[in-house]
Image (tube, rainbow, N blue to C red):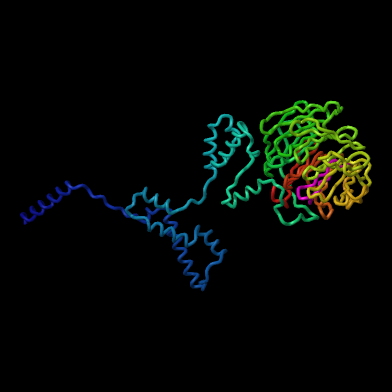
């Protein structure tokens, strides 16, 4: 017995020696219920509750699919739908057991999509880059690389070259419908985008941010005009400042301020090609021109021997040939647009107050004292017809519709007469088609829009004295100006954009109100 015990002890000692030579094996730990993460415990509990819920629904006979309310209630209670829970389980089964924790995390991230994209991350990135720009980071508030690029391009154009809004010959990519639509909105040619005519009665109109120079003291707006080819508006005030604004209907940001020192502006106009701005004052017999490309101001001297003491009223001919000045004692002076030299004078019997042209500039219409309207042939520079404005003592405004179907005249008593243009040349005392009596003070401005469907009538002698008339129905829109709208104060000037998309009213508080005419899709 002792020998057997000794043999067993020797065997055990050999086994212990062998175990000391071999490295200890790592025992694989299996997670118990206590070691399971809280997330898995919640999933296990939800599966148990959902299975019991399904059994209950089968017992009650609710085999039909759940409606939206039941599904929403189930998701609210359990935090997910059964389908979502099954997708999570499938995702866990697809992850291999021998994957390391890093590989498991990568696999889960590949399977799952981001719930949302935080735009603030992108904003912070751009702002960090923008801080490297000197004198710029305080005023930059952009989101995204594209907006930063656009901002830098605009900044470069303002400092080194012509503004981007004045590019000529823009080209568009015709392969993209969206780019085609954007190009269409940039065009300002003479065409109507909608085949439907403007309905009468109520006009669809929306107020946009006003054109106002906040950096200067408030002054009186005397002239508002839209650029003939670009989405830009010119606003001139009595403090000698002519401001250019980018018209987008949302911000209407100021682009540039042109200062004419000690020269209160009364009238300002773009040239027909949009390359030049001409301004005049009621206190001086000279004018100024501003070259849009060169950024240069040039003085236009007084007309020698004409005793012209002010340049408060003048017009630019549509053909780009003449600057037509309302002179004293019925004189109408003609200057060439290119050289600014005097080339002739036309004479009417009464005082000349208002002038307008036909579309190609071959005919000019003048109105003023004695209530007479003169029609001039600009090629021969002779009066070809004259007629009496019905019921008018002194004419103060005149406008010809672009389609040359209607001629509107305004008087010092607030009466606006509408004539059929075709019948004017057959008599010296034509009868008006319509007499508007909506204004009670002197008519200051008459303006037709580009489609000849709207006529703006206004008087600078009375607050809120603005009306819009519909053509060819010859009726006034009942909802403009609205009673609860922003006060226009004294409307000193009005203007339509090239394709009637926008309408502006300049007043005596330094603001030019902008309205979007929704019927017209183009600028």
Q: Where does residue 139 sit, x and y in percent of width and height?
A: 61, 34
The quarter in which the N terminus is drawn is: bottom left
* Residue 243, picture quadrant: top right
Residue 221, visible in the rendered structure? no
Along the horizontal axis of the image, is 115 left or right of 93?
right
Rendered residue at 16%/46% (across/down):
21
The foreground one among 138 and 197 is: 197
**Does 211 appear in magenta?**
no
Estimate the x, y position of residue 242 in percent, counting from the top left: 73, 33
In this view, which residue lies farthest toward the front? 380
Q: Which of 90 and 396 is in front in this view?
A: 396
What count of labels does the image hold?
0
Q: Is residue 453 magenta?
A: yes
Q: Is residue 507 visible?
A: yes
Task: Check the image and report above or below for 363 versus 69.
Answer: above
Give, as a single range, the part of the protein colored magenta.
442-457
Q: Residue at position x 86%, y 33% from top?
A: 327
Q: In this view, does 333 lie to the left or right of 197?
A: right
Query: Who is closer to the viewer here, 45 or 433?
Result: 433
Where is residue 183? Give x, y as percent.
63, 47
The structure residue drawn at horizontal position 48% and vertical position 66%, both measured from the top left corner, is: 53
Residue 493 sits in quarter:
top right
Q: Where does residue 71 sit, x and y in percent of width and height?
A: 54, 63
Near-viewer residue (131 or 92)? 131
From the viewer's perspective, tell me whether residue 463 is left or right of residue 73.
right
At 83% from the left and 35% from the top, the residue drawn is 313
């Amino acid at each position: 017995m002792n020998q057997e015990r000794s043999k067993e002890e020797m065997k055990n000692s050999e086994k212990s020696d062998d175990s000391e030579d071999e490295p200890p094996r790592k025992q694989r730990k299996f997670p118990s219920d206590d070691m399971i993460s809280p997330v898995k415990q919640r999933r296990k509990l939800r599966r148990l509750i959902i299975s019991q819920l399904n059994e209950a629904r089968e017992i009650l006979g609710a085999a039909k699919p759940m409606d939206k309310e039941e599904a929403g209630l189930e998701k609210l209670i359990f935090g997910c739908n059964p389908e979502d829970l099954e997708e999570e389980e499938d995702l866990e089964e697809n992850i291999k057991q021998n994957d390391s924790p890093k590989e498991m995390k990568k696999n889960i991230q590949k399977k799952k999509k981001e719930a949302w994209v935080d735009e603030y991350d992108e904003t912070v990135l751009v702002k960090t880059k923008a801080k490297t720009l000197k004198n710029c980071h305080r005023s930059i508030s952009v989101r995204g690389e594209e907006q930063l690029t656009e901002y830098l391009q605009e900044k470069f154009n303002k400092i080194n070259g012509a503004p981007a809004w004045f590019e000529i010959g823009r080209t568009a990519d015709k392969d993209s419908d969206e780019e085609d639509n954007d190009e269409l909105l940039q065009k300002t040619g003479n065409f109507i985008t909608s085949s439907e005519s403007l309905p009468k009665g109520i006009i669809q109109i929306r107020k946009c941010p006003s054109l106002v120079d906040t950096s200067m003291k408030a002054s009186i707006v005397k002239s508002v005009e839209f650029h003939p080819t670009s989405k830009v508006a010119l606003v001139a005030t009595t403090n000698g400042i002519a401001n250019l604004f980018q018209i987008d209907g949302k911000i209407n940001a100021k682009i540039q301020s042109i200062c004419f020192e000690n020269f209160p502006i009364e009238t300002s106009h773009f040239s027909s090609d949009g390359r030049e701005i001409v301004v005049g004052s009621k206190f001086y017999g000279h004018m100024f021109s501003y070259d849009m490309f060169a950024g240069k101001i040039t003085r236009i001297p007084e007309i020698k021997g004409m005793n012209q003491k002010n340049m408060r009223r003048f017009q630019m001919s549509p053909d780009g040939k003449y600057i037509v000045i309302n002179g004293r004692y019925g004189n109408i002076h003609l200057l060439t647009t290119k050289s600014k030299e005097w080339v002739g004078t036309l004479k009417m019997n009464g005082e000349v107050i208002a002038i307008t042209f036909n579309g190609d500039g071959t005919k000019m219409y003048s109105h003023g004292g004695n209530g007479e309207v003169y029609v001039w042939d600009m090629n021969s520079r002779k009066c070809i017809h004259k007629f009496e404005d019905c019921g008018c003592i002194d004419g103060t405004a005149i406008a010809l519709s672009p389609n040359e179907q209607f001629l509107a005249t305004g008087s010092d008593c607030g009466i606006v007469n509408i004539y059929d243009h075709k019948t004017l040349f057959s008599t010296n005392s034509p009868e008006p088609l319509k007499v508007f009596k909506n204004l009670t003070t002197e008519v200051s401005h008459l303006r037709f829009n580009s489609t000849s469907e709207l006529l703006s009538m206004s008087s600078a002698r009375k607050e809120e004295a603005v009306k819009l008339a519909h053509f060819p129905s010859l009726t006034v829109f009942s909802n403009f100006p609205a009673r609860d709208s922003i006060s226009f104060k004294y409307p000193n000037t009005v203007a339509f954009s090239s394709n009637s998309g926008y309408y502006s009213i300049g007043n005596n508080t330094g603001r030019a109100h902008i309205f979007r005419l929704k019927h017209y899709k183009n600028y």
